[in-house]
Amino acid sequence: MKPPAFAYHRPRSLADALDVLARLGAEAKVLAGGQSLVPLMSMRLAAPAALVDVNHVPGLDSVEVTADRVVVGALARHSRVEHDPEAYDAVPLLRRALLLVAHPTIRNRGTTVGSLVHGDPAAEMPAVLCLLDGFVTLRSASGSRDVPADAFFTGPMESDVRPGELAVSATFRRPPAGSRSSFLEVSRRHGDYAVCGVGAVVSDGTARVALIGVGAGPVLVPLDEPDDPDRVAAAVDAAIEPEDDIHATADYRRHLAQVLTRRALAEVS
Amino acid sequence: MTTRLFGERVPRVEDPRLVTGNGRFLDDLGHDALEAAFVRSPHAHARIVDIDVSEALDVEGLVAIYTYDDLDGRTGEALPLLIPHPTLTHGRTPHALARDEVNHVGEAVVMVVATSRYVAEDAAERVRVEYDFLPAVVGIEAARAAEELVHDDVPGNLAARMVQQTGDADAAVDAAPNLLELDLEIERSASMPLEGKGVLARWDPDDESLLVHTSTQTSTSVRQALAAKLGLPVDRVEVVTPDVGGGFGVKIVHPWPEEILVPWAAIRLGRPVKWTEDRREHFVSSAHERGQLHHVRVGYDDEGVLAGLSVRFWHDNGAYVPYGLIVPIITSTQLLGPYKPGVYRVEFDSLYTNTVLVTPYRGAGRPQGCYVMERVMDAIAAERGIDRTVVRERNFIRPEEMPYDHGLIFQDGRPLLYDSGDYPATLAKLKKLVGWDGFEAYREQARAEGRRVGIGLACYVEGTGVGPYEGGHIRVETDGTVVVSTGLTTQGQGHRTMLAQIVADELGVPFDRVRVTTGDTRRFKYAVGTFASRTAVMSGSAVALTARSVRDKALTIAAEALEVDVEDLEVVDGHVRVKGSPSSSIDLGAVAVLSNPLRYAFDEAAARATQFAAPADPEKPPVGPGEQPGLEGSDYYSPPRSTFANGMHAVVVETDPDTAEIRVLRYCVVHDCGTLVNPMLVEGQIHGGVAQGVGGALYERMEYAPDGQLLNASFMDFLMPYASEVPEVEIDHLVTPSPLNPLGVKGAGEAGVIPGAAAIASAIEDAEGLTITRMPISPSELFALRAAHRKETP
Ligand SMILES: Cc1cc2nc3c(=O)[nH]c(=O)nc-3n(C[C@H](O)[C@H](O)[C@H](O)COP(=O)(O)OP(=O)(O)OC[C@H]3O[C@@H](n4cnc5c(N)ncnc54)[C@H](O)[C@@H]3O)c2cc1C
């Protein structure tokens, strides 16, 4: 469980970071909190030729709250976002979901943007980005682009980050005043990735849920008639594609999707 | 008087070092050493056709690559079968490096030595091994069906078949008014210490000696094994255990292939070599335990009292059996717990599979036995409509029946004879602790809140402190320091504290003057090891006896110096003094000086002590016949047989009616391990055991694919409970001293884990009203059970 040799780059500015990423292209991986990447490398499941450690790039660790959004910088740790009082006031769902992400020690290192890029189908923050119509801002030596949540998650452990790009921030839109939100999940142990999880946001009579652990990525389900339990159940059931694994059967996950959706909606209505 | 330390909650002397990061575990040692990595079989069953190392040769930093063909002398032989048994007719053990066939994923095939572990793994990745695949035998059913064989020359995959009986049990079952048959299953888990195995070997060419540090539960036996395998005189080999980060059984097996190969390579290369097992290696190349299938027939009367019990079970022993039949033998005997089974018969098959080998893990076969017996008790209670505690009570061995002879042979080859215990009293304490009689009211209250709760219990008896012996050596230094050593090893239990408490009491010295060393063959050569909950019983008794003999010697010397009778002396606070006249005293350090006629006054103590020295008799030799210089002594303790501890656990669980999540709300333990040297240490042992019991009941399982790949060989997917999954443990003690040893103690190390799966199964069954026959159980499985149950009972 030791990684093979790799080159290590430690840029000190965003320009340098983009420069080295441009130069190395597909050979390089960005190193953020390292909580997902380092274990993969130690198990030799990932063997990038080079790491670009962005932890020393200034200006990437901010959490900015404005009238209509919360912008989380690439180096803002999960715990930083979780404990930011303004972010909590603006978007309570952020803290609610982050408390379900791993354990405090991991949240102290792991980044929210890293979690989005990593794209684990059972991860919480991708679902939150979907629920809040968020987007990820990607920079490269040749420009910048914003990718909306529904296009960003391209498959299990895959996201739309191209060689040479750095995800510099994620933007979560503030839901309208009076909105309510919830995040519930079942995991095998406290802090584990979810067997199944459901986030819900209700505002002005519209409702949507996003489910995790039951598809290739977060599964966003808009609910036209959130008060009709049968239609909700049918909509969720049609949207998810759970699979068996060693922790749970697809049947059980399908069942949990229903139970958790019901509970999450009950909480927010 | 010095306050007695025996029975006190003395804080662990080990902790300041450990919690400040100053522990020295294997991987903290030998930074100058070369490091080894292994090419391990990726296949469960295959013949090795060819090994091509050419691509690895140009990895910079590579020092050596070894395959089976390089092994010379006795290193090329199969590893020893440590504990043979007449019924183990087909015992097979592995070679240090696979010879021509691999029998499980993870078996070592090639050893790579390099300047660092990183480089060694780079080189290992470039070694090409060509295999001819053979069909894999995975799981007890496939092993039993024996359509494919693990070892060509072992028909039926049968390593051993063993029967024990006290009479015609099946006839007794058939003649009884009521009969039940149960099929029960328990899956594999593993010891899984936080620190894996590890070996560091240094060969000293000037001294022609080998010094090996290894993370083992038995340094003395590793030393003997190494000398034999490497063809070295035993006195040229020393084995030391550094701090060991847990063992739980897996490190009692010896020698592990790496324990031979690393020293062997160090001698060949003339340089220190180290190997530190990583987690993935530990999963696939150490050992697992627990997997068994049982078929039980039980006959009983209308009161639920057993008339006959007939148990047939199948034990998955993995690919090899270096540790013999210890696990299934313990299951087959300890299954009986605190009960009288009527006529008993047990028959087991120990079966080969193409999986990691199976050797004792804390509890060592008892959790399976306890689970089976307790499922039987619950089934009888349900069938008869009798309270579960009442059925148990009716079948208990009564205190007045002690000592109780089951008429069977135990793991140590001695009769299964319980020395003491008061099971009705233990149960009464447990019922009170958990509030058994008030539970129905609680259940109703919970139900009114829409919650589903259940209560369960399980009882066990644990043979502890198996022989043959342990020893102790104690020397009082001239500065009054008391240096104690015992040969068995320690893995975090707090042995140094516990043994120092005993010695301080017996010798009459302050606790902080006592220093204890364990597991260092340079200090103590004869020992067995740490397993079978034996340290307090064996080494505790041995150091107590040793302390008594050293105390006698001190009194003899002091009596002469103070010119009084031995009977008039006592030892208090490190001073020998005349009873009733405390000013007439001499400290033990001074006695140590007097014990040695060579008294160079290197220090003040020696100078001071000379005042007491009686004038030498010019006609006598300074050291008389039968005397020895130095205030020191050695003694051994060897018990006639094991001493039997017992305990009972009760669990309250809540199951979510919708999500099928299972939560342990309360976990109560009543425990009887005889006299307690240090209740805090005993409770620590129980806490750890309960955590592993909860793990085995609700989380841990080795997930093997049909082709023999272990699918969850990492902490990401092999779910050990976190602190957040382990309930608060409520403990009460009962003390029925053992008559077999000078301290009255019984073992406590394994106890906590034994009834975990049984008690939790009982509680879930109670909450859910459905039958549980297989453990562990996950929420997903409970969900499936509910669905099946609804189908059966529409
Ligand atoms: C024991 C444990 C439990 C966990 N449980 C959970 C859980 O319950 N839920 C959950 O969501 N997560 C969980 N995680 C994962 C954790 O949240 C990670 O921190 C997170 O997924 C990745 O963030 P990171 O900063 O550590 O990224 P890294 O590990 O540094 O990187 C992950 C991947 O993203 C890429 N990357 C990271 N940042 C950028 C960037 N700015 N631009 C471009 N690419 C980038 C990397 O190249 C890499 O491919 C757990 C982790 C552990 C170790």
Image (cartoon, helix red, strand yellow):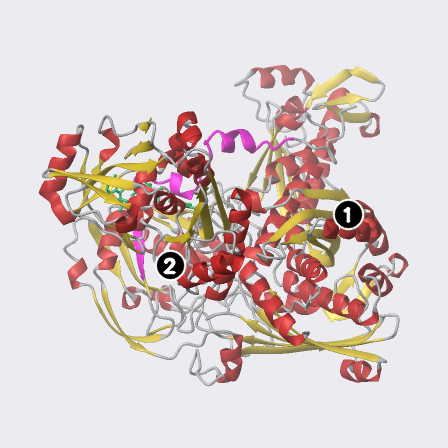
Amino acid type, callout 2: Gly
Q: What range of the chain is rendered magenta?
A: B11-39
State which mark lies toward you, 1 or 2.
Answer: 2
Residue B317 x %, y %: 52, 70
* Chain for disc number 1: B
In the image, is residue A171 above or below residue B57?
A: above
Q: Residue at x 24, y 46 (%)?
A: B115
In the rendered image, which residue does mark 1 sit on?
A: B434
In terms of secondary structure, where does tag 2 sit? loop
**A199 or B119, nearer to the observer:** A199
In the image, is residue B701 above or below residue B209?
A: below
Residue A44 x %, y %: 28, 53
**B510 or A12, nearer to the observer:** A12
* Chain for disc number 2: A
Q: Quadrant of residue B548?
A: top right
| Residue A215 marker | 2
**B447 or A207, nearer to the observer:** A207
Q: Is residue B293 left or right of residue B299?
A: left
Which residue appears farthest toward the right when viewing the image?
A: B400
Residue B624 x %, y %: 67, 35
Q: Is residue B788 magenta?
A: no
Ligand 1: image quarter? top left
Q: Is residue B23 magenta?
A: yes
